[in-house]
Amino acid sequence: MPADRAGWSWLMGKVYGLVARNPASNEAVFEEARLQPGERVLDIGSGAGHALRLAAAVVGPANVFGVDPTAALASTAEKRVPGAKVAVAVAEDLPFDDDTIDVVWSIASFHHWEDPEAGLREVARVLAPGGRVLVAERVLRRPGGHGLTVAEAENLSHRLATLGFDDVEVVKRKAGRHEMAIVKGRTAA
Ligand SMILES: C[S@@+](CC[C@H](N)C(=O)[O-])C[C@H]1O[C@@H](n2cnc3c(N)ncnc32)[C@H](O)[C@@H]1O
């Protein structure tokens, strides 16, 4: 990576870790996930790792994994949760074997994925039987911003059903000043 990009990436990681986050959305997803001790959790687009820390308190840091394409954020997240592993990777090409994760969540990241369909297929591949997915985005009034409209969230839930997920639903939750749509599903046991 050119030095100027590396510097920018480092700065972005620092700034993002300090300010550009919504702790309430992390907490809402954590609560919805109802983690059990020992479950293996993957956060796609884990950013500075705040949600990873919530997961680690229940499942243990060794069971916590993240991926983020921004190297500075991946490294910030690993420092935040010693023992967790955060890879520099994208949703569309997850560095995990089939059936190895119990809970996948992705918070305010899905709308950034270049190929959402490929990312969802990867989620289905890495989840173990009976595994859960939670994709959380801020609810938007119109398409094109940092989140999903209600119609887009419903569409995502239909995509999950088409991919074979059961118990698919869209849960709406208040998270700080924003409303979040959490699209949930479960792989067949
Ligand atoms: C708005 S931030 C959210 C970070 C964190 N989940 C949170 O809620 O604080 C979006 C994150 O998605 C990551 N991202 C962008 N494209 C991605 C992709 N294709 N796969 C996985 N993560 C991606 C970005 O690097 C960024 O860290």
Image (tube, rainbow, N blue to C red):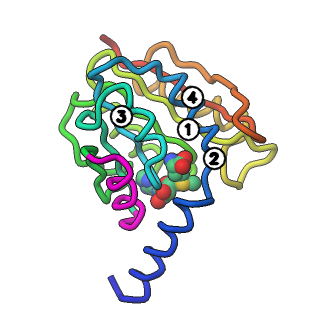
Of labels 4 and 3, earlier in sequence is 3
For the residues labelled 4 and 3, the Cα–Cα distance comes to: 22 Å
The local crowd at label 2, few if under 14, some if 14 to 19, many if 20 or more residues have their Cα within 10 Å, is some
Residue ID for mark 1: 26
Does mark 1's beta carbon lie closer than 8 Å to ligand 1? Answer: yes
Q: Is residue 75 magenta?
A: yes
* Disc 4, SS: strand
Q: What amino acid is at disc 1?
A: Asn
For the residues labelled 3 and 2, the Cα–Cα distance comes to: 19 Å
Q: Quadrant of the N terminus?
A: bottom left
* Disc 1, SS: helix
Residue ID for mark 4: 183
Question: Is 125 displayed left or right of 48 in the figure?
Answer: left
Judge whether residue 95 can be spotted in this image.
yes
Residue at image location 42% in from the left, 40% down from the top: 53
Does mark 2's beta carbon lie closer than 8 Å to ligand 1? Answer: yes
Q: What amino acid is at disc 3?
A: Ala
Q: Nearer the viewer, mark 4 or mark 2?
A: 2
Residue at image location 46% in from the left, 55% down from the top: 48
Badge number at residue 22: 2
- The answer to whether residue 9 is above or below residue 106 is below
Residue ID for mark 3: 56
The local crowd at label 4, few if under 14, some if 14 to 19, many if 20 or more residues have their Cα within 10 Å, is many
The local crowd at label 3, few if under 14, some if 14 to 19, many if 20 or more residues have their Cα within 10 Å, is many
Stretch of the chain drawn in magenta: 70-82
Question: Is 133 displayed left or right of 28 in the figure?
Answer: left
